[in-house]
């Protein structure tokens, strides 16, 4: 464990904010699929930075979001270079600046793959008496602190295989604390832990990273450790920017852990007219929360607080539910081909496999300055019109008041852990409840099995490809042009969608896949697994094509 301590309490905790020096690129680059992947993502993000639009955003998101186990290739030369590490760090910074959270989770996933591959290769070397080690010195010495901590925890999880990933994270951090006897030494560990946990809270729900889905007991232990780290490093959890990070982190994990995290396909039911318009305007229209079709919108949770007998903390009283900002909501359904949904909302069904929806519909805002907190000091990056994605939070809607109380009680327990005053705890809760009230509805809506995406808008930014008009927020997006599949009745956009998906696959696919000519589903696992593929796993059509790569 000494290697971990040294990595955090020595010079390894400093974040080098200089961008990639092209002269450092190895002669043979890319020499494997992982390096090729990084190169393509790097170029796509650079293009998005220079020419921000929903189209350049789609290219980035297409490259960094996966769903299937076998989507990314592992072929090529087995190596990890300093150039790869600097590229990972640079992309991580860009992910922070642009608020492209899936870019950051992509990098954590890539580190998982590289760490697991290196372990297997080291064991093969050992079997032929070739000196080798599971250690990856380039990662240990060069990765940013949060990525480095993740590498150590995943390596321990992948090698020992006797504990959950959450338990291994805790084990690694606990050992670091034992060997760190002052707040100056604990601070880098605390900062890395909070940053990593916040990054992972934006998981999109793919198959490979299911070990990130911490259960409520694991979440409580992780939050308890986080509070302890903040206390040991003399950090005030109520002071920005830490307060905002904790709020999103706690909310993301608790809301996403509803129903044991989302494993369902997500569907947008629209009319033929909306489908037809989507070809022309490439827009998603969203209403303000005050104008949704439920007259009791945002009323269920405030009513729960009217009877405080179920609330065990004295600081939770006289909660103010007055809206402090405008929220817009886009709703999806977790039911495939539901007749009631077709009747009520439309016969054209656009399907999605995970929460990449959140960033597809996130408005792009331009800002001139970005704050980056490095170690104990704040540095200001001066960038002209840096494109940033607006915040979007995703959750399943709850329809059971008892479950809502149980979940809120868990939220109260977590907030009560914070070493802040009771008034500050109350304010912390009130800010979170601003959007939490959107997540619980009356039981009569339960058949809709709604998953919501709530968009946060900020007054101080210049938004592009977005306008507020006729009580709608209209955001340009590739959501309807490039769904994961389509179902339902005749869709006037289907002959536009198919070539768009085929063009996308030509750009991003590097492994064999099945393509369904009926619903346009793409599946990598059914092709790269065992057995013969005879029909589409979504629509059951036998009109499928196997594309060999």
Image (spheres, rainbow, N blue to C red):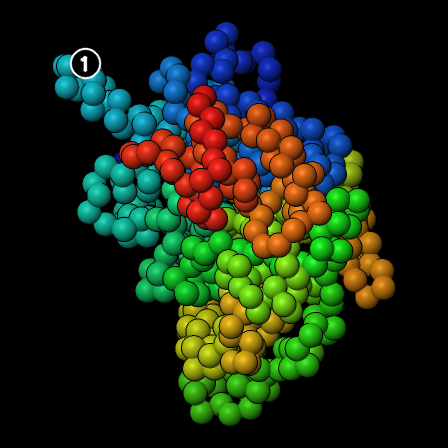
Q: Nearer the viewer, residue 512 or 326?
A: 512
Q: Secondary structure at mark 1?
A: loop
Residue 208 percent coordinates (x, y):
38, 42
Left or right? Give the position of 464 relative to 425: right
Residue 247 percent coordinates (x, y):
54, 62
Residue 53 percent coordinates (x, y):
74, 38
The correct choice, above or below, for 379 with respect to 73 in the image is: below
The correct choice, above or below, for 520 with respect to 511 in the image is: below
Report the residue marked by disc 1. 130
The correct choice, above or below, for 331 with respect to 445 in the image is: above
Neighbor class of circle 1 (other Cα within 10 Å; few <14, some 14-19, many 20+) is: few
Q: Nearer the viewer, residue 437 or 206?
A: 206
Instruction: List the single residue furthest toward the right.
Output: 470
The quadrant holding residue 379 is top right
Left or right? Give the position of 301 relative to 371: left
Residue shown at 33% from the left, 34% from the top: 532
Residue 93 percent coordinates (x, y):
58, 36
Q: Nearer the viewer, residue 445 or 312?
A: 445
Q: Nearer the viewer, residue 512 or 236?
A: 512
Q: Is residue 498 visible?
A: yes
Q: Is residue 142 visible?
A: no
Quarter of the image containing the C terminus?
top left
Residue shown at 58% from the left, 11% from the top: 23
Residue shown at 36% from the left, 31% from the top: 528
Residue shown at 18% from the left, 14% from the top: 130
């Amino acid at each position: 464990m000494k290697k971990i301590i040294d990595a955090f309490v020595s010079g390894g905790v400093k974040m080098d904010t200089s961008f990639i020096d092209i002269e450092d690129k190895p002669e043979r680059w890319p020499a494997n699929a992982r390096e090729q992947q990084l190169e393509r993502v790097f170029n796509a993000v650079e293009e998005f930075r220079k020419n921000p639009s929903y189209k350049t955003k789609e290219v980035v998101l297409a490259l960094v979001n996966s769903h299937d186990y076998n989507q990314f290739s592992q072929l090529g030369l087995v190596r990890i270079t300093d150039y790869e590490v600097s590229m990972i760090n640079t992309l991580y910074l860009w992910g922070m600046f642009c608020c492209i959270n899936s870019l950051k989770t992509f990098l954590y996933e890539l580190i998982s793959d590289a760490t697991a591959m290196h372990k297997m290769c080291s064991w093969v070397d050992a079997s032929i008496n070739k000196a080798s080690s599971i250690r990856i010195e380039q990662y240990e010495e060069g990765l940013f602190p949060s990525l480095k901590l993740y590498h150590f925890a995943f390596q321990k999880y992948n090698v020992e295989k006797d504990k959950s990933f959450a338990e291994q994270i805790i084990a690694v951090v606990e050992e670091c604390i034992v060997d760190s006897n002052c707040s100056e030494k604990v601070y880098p560990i605390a900062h890395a832990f909070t940053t990593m946990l916040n990054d992972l809270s934006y998981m999109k729900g793919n198959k490979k990273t299911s070990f990130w889905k911490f259960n409520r007991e694991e979440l409580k232990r992780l939050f308890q450790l986080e509070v302890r780290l903040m206390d040991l490093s003399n950090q005030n959890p109520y002071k920005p920017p830490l307060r905002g990070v904790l709020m999103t982190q706690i909310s993301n994990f608790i809301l996403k852990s509803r129903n044991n995290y989302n494993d369902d396909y997500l569907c947008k039911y629209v009319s033929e007219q909306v489908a037809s318009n989507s070809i022309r305007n490439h827009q998603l229209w969203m209403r303000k929360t005050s104008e949704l079709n439920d007259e009791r919108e945002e009323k269920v949770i405030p009513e729960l607080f009217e009877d405080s007998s179920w609330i065990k903390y004295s600081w939770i009283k006289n909660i103010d539910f007055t809206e402090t900002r405008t929220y817009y909501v886009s709703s999806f359904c977790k039911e495939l081909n539901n007749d009631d949904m077709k009747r009520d909302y439309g016969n054209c069904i656009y399907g999605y496999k995970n929460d990449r929806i959140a960033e597809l519909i996130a408005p792009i805002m331009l800002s001139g300055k970005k704050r980056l907190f490095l170690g104990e000091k704040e540095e200001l990056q001066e960038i002209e019109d840096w494109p940033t994605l607006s915040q979007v939070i995703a959750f399943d809607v709850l329809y059971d008041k008892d479950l809502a109380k149980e979940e809120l009680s868990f939220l109260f327990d977590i907030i009560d852990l914070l070493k802040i005053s009771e008034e500050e705890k109350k304010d912390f809760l009130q800010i979170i409840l601003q959007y939490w009230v959107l997540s619980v509805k009356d039981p009569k809506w339960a058949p809709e099995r709604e998953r919501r995406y709530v968009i946060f808008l900020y007054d101080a930014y210049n938004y592009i490809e977005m306008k507020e008009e006729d009580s709608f927020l209209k955001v340009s997006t590739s959501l309807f042009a490039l769904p994961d599949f389509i179902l339902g009745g005749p869709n006037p956009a289907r002959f536009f969608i198919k070539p768009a998906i085929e063009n996308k696959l030509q750009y991003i696919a590097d492994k064999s896949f099945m393509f369904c000519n009926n619903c346009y589903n793409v599946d990598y696992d059914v092709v790269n697994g065992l057995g013969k593929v005879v029909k589409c796993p979504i629509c059951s059509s036998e009109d499928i094509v196997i594309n060999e790569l």
